Amino acid sequence: MDKVSVQLTVMQMCSEPDVEKNLAFIKHQLEQLPIEGDHIVVLPECCLFFGGKDAEQLALAKATAKDNSLVKSLAVLAKKYQVILVAGSIPLLTQNGEKFTNTCCVFSATGEQIGRYDKLHLFDVEVDDSEKSYLESRYTQAGDTTTVLAATDKINLGLSICYDLRFPELFRELSNYGANVITVPSAFTKVTGEAHWQVLLQSRAIENQVYIVAAGQSGRHTNGRETWGHSMIINPWGEIMTSLDQMPGCATATFSLENLNKVRKSMPIQAHNQFITKLK
Ligand SMILES: O=C(O)CNC(=O)[C@H](CS)NC(=O)CCC(=O)C(=O)O
């Protein structure tokens, strides 16, 4: 394996409204991953609590705000299994205590929190499924900043969550600020996922010449809601390197800086772009 390679893993889950059960599932999956070199593991949106009643997430955010227990339990896993953990999302109570942010926390392999991103685009959308309409903004407060962070000496990680995938401006901004891997923890609905998930992911990879690491919720959840799954890892040429169908589990692919540089050198779209904000 060349020196600049890093392992990327998507973990697909069918999370329940039960934090301990979800933690046990994540732990069981991490136990089976090889520990060698740098390894980035991406969990889905709402990895620790999903498929309950809408108000339950807010209750969880309130109950765990004082001791920060959701964050701590994820930090422990990153350290124990020595992986860089992009912990999909968890609900974190806002300052005024009225809502929560849908937040992705990133932990180093030594268990330090090295990044945070609050979902920018909230899913207030009508869908032709059993839910009929989604109103994420009822309990969730949107974020107001984008996040790119150095995850290893070769990887600048750009963070997004689920519905953000439909806003190419966010991905352009992340890649302008140096992201070469963008993570997309998700809970796409079955209906919209079937129609749009893969083509959106491939588009974001191709137009920004980045690796896309997209980990989804999958299956039928306790409240009857159905999510699409089909977690995948896509390279900067837009090829699907590995993917899952509906079953929970993990899939791994290798990041190569050489491959990324080759794609960007042969087709220098960043330099050619007439619309880009010149950053420096
Ligand atoms: O509310 C929760 O419990 C957790 N959050 C979610 O499931 C979020 C907001 S409802 N789902 C999405 O963003 C789906 C996007 C999507 O499906 C699309 O863009 O097509």
Image (cartoon, rainbow, N blue to C red):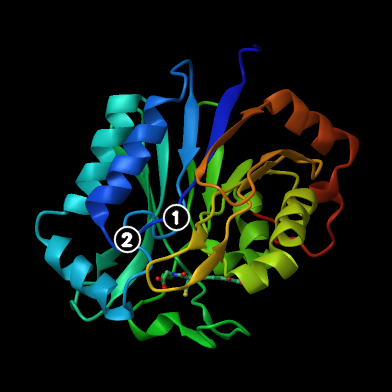
Is residue 144 rendered to the left or right of residue 153? left
Helix, strand or loop at label 1? It is: loop
Residue positioned 43% across, 25% down in the render? 32
Residue positioned 33% across, 79% down in the render? 54
Helix, strand or loop at label 2? It is: loop
Circles 1 and 2, Cβ within 8 Å, touching? The answer is no
Q: Which mark is residue 49?
A: 2
Total numbered labels? 2
Q: Is residue 97 above or below residue 50?
A: below
Q: Which mark is residue 14?
A: 1
Image coords of residue 242 (percent x, y): 68, 37
Residue count near mark 1 (Cα–Cα under 10 Å), binned few <14, some 14–19, many ≥20: many
Image coords of residue 105 (percent x, y): 36, 50
Toward the right, the furthest residue is 266
Look at the image and tell me whether residue 260 can be seen: yes
Residue positioned 22% across, 81% down in the render? 98
- Sequence-wise first label, 1 or 2: 1
Q: Is residue 273 above or below residue 267?
A: below
Image coords of residue 181 (percent x, y): 61, 42
- Which residue type carries mark 2? Phe
Nearer the camera: disc 1 or disc 2: 1
Point out the image quarter for the N terminus.
top right
Q: CA distance from mark 1 to mark 2?
A: 10 Å
Image coords of residue 264 (percent x, y): 81, 38
* Mark 2 close to ligand 1, CB under 8 Å: yes
Is residue 145 rendered to the left or right of residue 26? right
- Which residue type carries mark 1? Cys
